[in-house]
Image: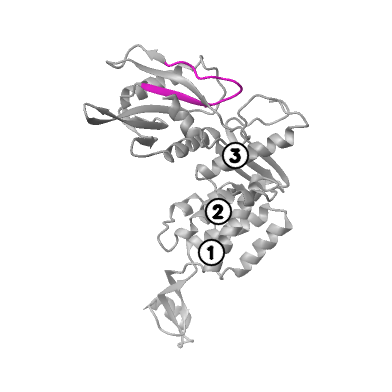
Amino acid sequence: MRNGVKFANYVGVIQIGNLVIEILPKADKATLSKENEIETYDKWRRVLLKMLAISGNLKIDSVSQSFLKKRYNSLLELYFEIYLNEVSLLLRRGLVKKYRKDAANVKALKGRINFARNIQENLIHQERFHTTHQCYDFEHLINQILLKGLKVLKQLSNRESIISRVNKLRFAFPEIKEINVDQASFVKINLNRKTETYSEAIKIAKMLILNYSPDISKGQDDMLALLFDMNMLWEKYIYRMLKRREDAELKIGFQESDKFWNNRAIHPDIVIRKKHLIDNEEYWKPYIIDTKWKIVEPSKPSDDDLKQMFAYNLYWDARKSILLYPKTGEKKDGKFGEYHKGHIESHFCKVGFVDVLNEKGELNMGVADDVIRKI
């Protein structure tokens, strides 16, 4: 793309200094006019936020109508506000304390004396003891990550209201040591019953801290990129919506696995199982759904996709599979095409389309029924 940047299959937001670039999904090829640009932009932003919420990337109640009435300059600002709300709530409830080991000079003997250090440091001040002892305080990794998240947020935002809230929250924080936080820091976290209320704040802190690049290319502008793979987002949205329809006669599987070659495995996106009665015995009939976020023609699935679905049919003993795409324009499903080998019985695959939007231009919350009708 000349004189520009093209984002393939990613949505989200990039901030470089004061420049914010928001990348939204758009399941059609229609060009934008000046008249409908803002309306289309707002529509697809709402769609993205709802998808992020359903897929587990955004707190559900943050995408309520009342929350969205507030105008945000970007998706990033929405994440900022959610993070500040979560940290504020944790501070009001009281941050969790933990036990930790500390080595220091103390006036009252407690713990174990470090004799070498004690002689070295306290030969004159014999009223002191250098000991290793247990402390019960706020000085632990989870609280340190929250503090680091506030620091990063302040670096990124230029809105006075956000900076003011950050300053108030940092002032309310107990005195704890600031640390460097990286991917390994989050691996060490193990939330339990006492700390599970931290989960949303930690999730957003992780996104902010690990995707933050201070002084990009040794320049003066900090950068943050929060990007989501649209194929994965579409897959998770379809799965979560189908999962809501699960009942005594319908079971939904996600990313199931089976050995394919040596230690390699294959993973269909979604497996739908419908209960059937054969000679008064229950039988769960499998159907394979493979989701893809791209624009295709109904009669022209790629050979690679068809071969992949052939393998899924074979390994999951499924007679029908669907390559599922977002619907654009007036496209209709292709017909079930027959594979010529692989099963004793015939087995089939087709290209299917589902509407991303409903008649009101909002995210299609009836998509699960649309998918089930296709099988």
The residue labelled by disc 2 is 205
Q: Position of residue 150 (x, y in %)?
A: 61, 59
Q: Position of residue 25 (x, y in %)?
A: 61, 34
Disc 1 and disc 2 in contact, CB within 8 angstroms: no
Report the front residue among 172 and 349.
349
Q: Which mark is residue 48?
A: 3
Which image quadrant for residue 12? top right
Decide whether residue 83 is among the magenta residues: no
Report the quarter where the N terminus lies: top right
Q: Is residue 97 left or right of residue 69?
A: left
Question: Residue at coordinates 51% horizontally, 43% vertically from top-left?
Answer: 54
Report the front residue among 56 and 98.
56
Identified by mark 2, the residue type is: Ala
Q: Earlier in the sequence, mark 3 or mark 2?
A: 3
Between the C-alphas of marks 1 and 2, the distance is: 14 Å
> Which class describes the residues within 10 Å of circle 2: few (<14), some (14-19), or many (20+)?
many
The residue labelled by disc 1 is 90
- The magenta-colored residue range is 320-336
Decide whether residue 328 is among the magenta residues: yes
Which image quadrant for residue 251? top left
Q: Secondary structure at mark 3?
A: helix
